[in-house]
Amino acid sequence: MPRKVIVDLDPGIDDALALCMLLFDPDWDVVAVTAVGGNVPPHVATRNAQALIAYLDPPRIPRIGAATAPERGLPVDGRFANSVDDLRDASLTVAELRTPHPSEKLLTDEVRAAPHAVTVLALGPLTNIARAIQRDPEFPVLVHRLIIAGGAIQVPGNITPAAEFNIYCDPHAAKIVFASKAAKTLVPLDVTNRVNFSLSFLNELPPETNKIGALLRKILPAKFRAYRQHLGLETIHLHDSLTYLAACRPDLFRYEELAGDVETVGEITRGATIFDRRPVPAWQENRLEVAVGIDAAAIRLELLKRLNAAAQAAGNVESPP
Ligand code: RIB
Ligand code: CA
């Protein structure tokens, strides 16, 4: 029996790859895809989510939630701040949603409709999840689990020296989510940075004739270019796709339960995630299951396996994206 899931995302190249795998994964029933601003502004995130779903045409079309800007605005233009992470190379087109539902409404509605059964994969800033908690105070106890791509424990940030991108974009939202009673898993940079994908990954993608292969072959080269130009790296990291894999194969990760909080006001530490790792932690609330170890070789194989299975299910391209 497939497990219900909502994916909250800011597509984003890595988000798009995760979505390709998830939408065709028979282990999951994707009840909603909720957009959030981050890598791209909110209206672009919504349009990209819509366009990806329209292009991929999965067996079950999920509901789509529309993104709106966080109360304090987005602190960065994500397109440049986090390595030019958008889908412009795919030239996807789609009509505007006729009756857009805010992402946080879909989150609370779907979790209410199936109490304790819906997992939420949070692959972008935590704006929508915090709003869902504020909109429905029972959301944290009704959601099955939040699996969050974000944070950095002992490694540097990827948007500032102190902060990981998703948390940095809306630290106030992240603070609310960390403090909530929801069961939470955090997949931080400490583990996602350990899996490197070199240019040869492009040769391992499904063929150009395949729907998913055609899309990824258009959008992934920009990520390699951006990592080289902005970070001086020849390999890329796929934080969101690995977070999806953490939901599918938790056995390929090692976890510690930690109490964590988020810096919201620091002059140079905004968005830093702080964990109380002292022998007797002061914070009794804010408990998170944090991924601290990863079987990098097995994860790589798992990604290729699930990507190829998704590509087979998606079928061949009728007209190129
Ligand atoms: O820090 C990782 C996040 O930033 C991911 O969600 C990815 O989309 C990137 O832009
Ligand atoms: Ca993302």
Image (cartoon, grey):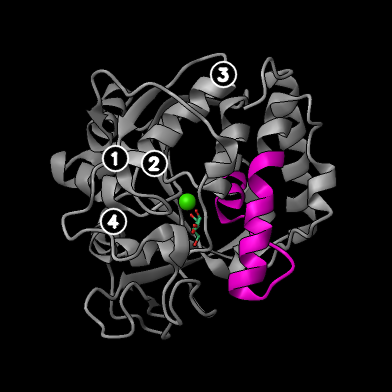
Going by the numbered disc 2, the residue's amino acid type is Ala
Q: Which residues are magenta?
A: 217-245
Q: Does residue 221 appear anywhere in the picture?
A: yes
- Of circles 2 and 4, the one toward us is 2
Task: Give me the residue at 56% from left, 17% from top.
Answer: 57
Q: CA distance from mark 1 to mark 3?
A: 22 Å
Depicted 138 relative to depicted 71: above or below: above
**Number of numbered labels in the structure image:** 4
The residue beneath circle 1 is 67
- Residue 121 lies in what quarter of the image? top left
Question: Reading the chain from its start, which is encountered first: label 3 or label 4?
Answer: 3
Question: Reading the chain from its start, which is encountered first: label 2 or label 4?
Answer: 2
Dominant secondary structure, magenta: helix
**Viewer-proximal residue, 157 or 114?**
157
Does mark 4's beta carbon lie closer than 8 Å to ligand 1? no
Q: CA distance from mark 3 to mark 4?
A: 30 Å
Residue 114 within the segment the image draws in magenta: no
Judged from the image, the secondary structure of the residue bearing numbered disc 1 is loop
The residue beneath circle 4 is 177
Task: Give me the residue at 58% from left, 72% from top.
Answer: 230
